[in-house]
Image (tube, rainbow, N blue to C red):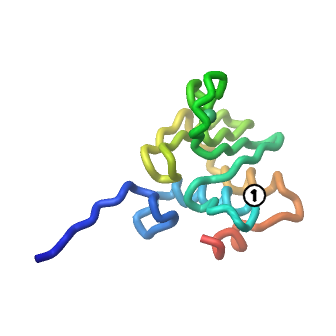
Amino acid sequence: MSITVITPRGMFGASDQDEALDTAMRLIAVAFAAPEEWASKYGTDYENDTFMMHRYCWCEREECPWCFGSAPNFLHKPSGFKVKWYKYIGRGMETEGKPPPDLLESVFASNPGGTTIEQAARLL
Ligand SMILES: [Zn+2]
């Protein structure tokens, strides 16, 4: 007898099933998160002039734009590119707009002296 366990996409964080957008979101999340967060799975809460990232929210407060509004989990401000996910990066991903070809470079350049793309890739 064999048992097949099917888990929601993204449930265990980064995997070899990730698409390029999943990987981009994970790289950004780990670069801007505190080390104790499981940011490669959930994302992180961070905002600057270039982008905003917000984890899936379970607060259930009526005024919460993530629970009851249409706030994205990721917004690239210069291009207006938006990403939403359900609970974890990679699960139920929806996008609005077109990601700019320099999305990662743009976001990582907004954190001068911070984690590089190469360093973030080692954290996944
Ligand atoms: Zn909420």
Q: Is residue 2 left or right of residue 122?
A: left
**Residue in view at x 52 percent, y 56 percent:** 22
Which quarter shows the C terminus? bottom right
Q: Which residue matches tag 1?
A: 32
Choose between 112 and 66: the one closer to the eye: 66
Choose between 59 and 4: the one closer to the eye: 59
Count of numbered labels shown in the rendering: 1
Residue 37 place in picture, x, y as percent: 68, 62
Using the image, determine if residue 54 lies above or below residue 26. above
Q: Farthest residue toward the left?
A: 1
Q: Quadrant of ligand 1?
A: top right
| Amino acid at the residue labelled 1 | Phe
Residue 36 place in picture, x, y as percent: 71, 66
Choose between 39 and 77: the one closer to the eye: 39
Which quarter of the picture shows residue 74?
Answer: top right
Residue 81 place in picture, x, y as percent: 62, 37
**Residue in view at x 72 percent, y 56 percent:** 105
Q: Farthest residue toward the right?
A: 113
